């Protein structure tokens, strides 16, 4: 339970509704900032403007999955209120106050570091990344169906990268009957790909391996699908780039060659906002409970 814990949830999208629901269930004291247009009746939860929050009592601040933008603005889909995350705001919090976001940026890092608060990036955690890979793979299936005129079953698909997303994507397409090959650079990854009964290839040989594919799914957040790789692909190839912006594809060259290449960020929040919210909510509940327990023990 989170009885006695005061949490400010500032901004976000539909995923935060699951966080609110979960933390309410656990009896946390919640202030919602940037939710004034939310119709949902969360009984006992206070909606506030950012200047109305007394940050001196706040044990945890939960920012949107994207944190802030590069100017420090906290975005919300539930309000037109302009909200800024500033050093001045954070300095009001007690020293034990922890800031949670999905990812970070230089602005957020600088503010939190200069005030000396703890910052937890939920999407850096393996468990969150692995759970999130499930709606990501489902969203990728959706995109492939939408942008091809053949079945996934029997299609030749190259997945680039065997990280948390790559592994789930490769497995999912193989389960649908696609002929999946996976490109990686580490020998243990190549061994794992073979163990999964998929076709492994070294990324050094990428150009050779794209000559016969129908779909290329990139999960590597570096430029790997270069112009020379795209030049070797059949003209009908669909490229879906899942890597974080700006992706790992030469989109300019793909367009020039007439190859359809799509950057597909944020699929979990698009195809399964409720599940994506529950993933974040469950981990947050664990982390906040552990934090509360630790502080109670330290007080003894
Ligand atoms: P990850 O577990 O770190 O996997 C990244 C993979 O890329 C690893 O196989 C890694 O191989 C490889 N890699 C990294 N740099 C490389 C390089 N320079 N050359 C060759 N291979 C390289 O990350 P993840 O959790 O799978 O996420 C992958 C990407 O998808 C991230 O950018 C993430 O933000 C994004 N993502 C997108 C969505 C979406 O909806 N589109 C959802 C979730 C995540 P090594 O081990 O050899 O380094």
Image (spheres, rainbow, N blue to C red):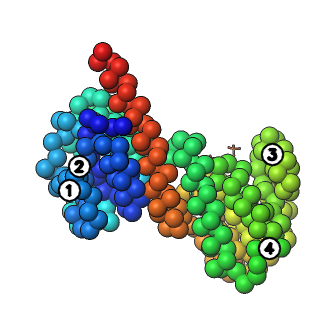
The residue where tag 3 is placed is 192
Determine whether the residue tagged by mark 4 lies in a helix, strand or loop.
loop
Marks 3 and 1, how far apart in space?
Answer: 49 Å
Q: In the rendered structure, which disc, 2 or 4, sits on the residue that comes first in sequence? A: 2
The residue where tag 4 is placed is 153
Between 148 and 295, the one lying in front of the other is 295
Q: Evaluate whether residue 210 shows in this view.
A: no
* Quarter of the figure that contains the N terminus: top left
Left or right placement of residue 65 versus residue 30 in this view: right
Q: Evaluate whether residue 215 shows in this view.
A: yes
The residue where tag 1 is placed is 47
Residue at x 38% of width, y 31% of height: 291
Between 63 and 213, the one lying in front of the other is 63
Instruction: Find residue 31 and name its label.
Output: 2
Which residue is at the far left?
52
Mark 1 neighbour density, 10 Å: few (under 14) some (14–19) many (20 or more) = many
Determine whether the residue tagged by mark 2 lies in a helix, strand or loop.
strand
Q: In the rendered structure, which disc, 4 or 1, sits on the residue that comes first in sequence? A: 1
Residue at x 74% of width, y 64% of height: 173
Marks 2 and 4, how far apart in space?
Answer: 49 Å
Tag in front: 2 or 3? 2
Left or right placement of residue 14 versus residue 128 in this view: left
């Amino acid at each position: 339970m989170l009885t006695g814990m005061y949490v400010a949830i500032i901004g976000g999208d539909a995923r935060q509704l699951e966080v609110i629901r979960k933390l309410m269930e656990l009896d946390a004291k919640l202030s919602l900032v940037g939710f004034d247009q939310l119709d949902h009746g969360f009984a006992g939860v206070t909606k506030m403007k950012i200047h109305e929050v007394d940050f001196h009592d706040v044990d945890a601040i939960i920012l949107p999955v994207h944190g802030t933008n590069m100017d420090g603005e906290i975005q919300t889909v539930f309000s037109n209120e302009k909200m800024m995350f500033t050093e001045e705001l954070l300095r009001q919090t007690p020293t034990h106050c922890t800031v949670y976001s999905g990812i970070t940026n230089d602005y957020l890092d600088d503010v939190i570091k200069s005030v000396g608060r703890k910052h937890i990036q939920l999407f850096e955690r393996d468990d969150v990344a692995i759970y999130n890979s499930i709606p990501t793979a489902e969203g990728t299936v959706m995109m492939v169906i939408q942008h091809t005129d053949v079945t996934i079953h029997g299609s030749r698909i190259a997945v680039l990268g065997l990280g948390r997303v790559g592994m789930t994507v490769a497995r999912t397409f193989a389960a649908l009957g696609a002929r999946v090959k996976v490109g990686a650079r580490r020998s243990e990854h190549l061994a794992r790909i073979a163990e999964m009964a998929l076709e492994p290839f070294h990324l050094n040989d990428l150009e050779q391996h794209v000559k016969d594919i129908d779909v290329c799914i990139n999960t590597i957040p570096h430029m790997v699908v270069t112009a020379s790789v795209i030049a070797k692909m059949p003209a009908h190839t669909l490229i879906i780039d899942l890597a974080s912006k700006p992706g790992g594809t030469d989109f300019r060259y793909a367009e020039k060659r007439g190859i359809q290449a799509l950057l597909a960020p944020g699929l979990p929040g698009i195809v399964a906002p409720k599940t994506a919210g529950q993933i974040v909510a469950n981990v947050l509940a664990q982390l906040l409970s552990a934090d509360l327990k630790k502080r109670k023990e330290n007080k003894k």
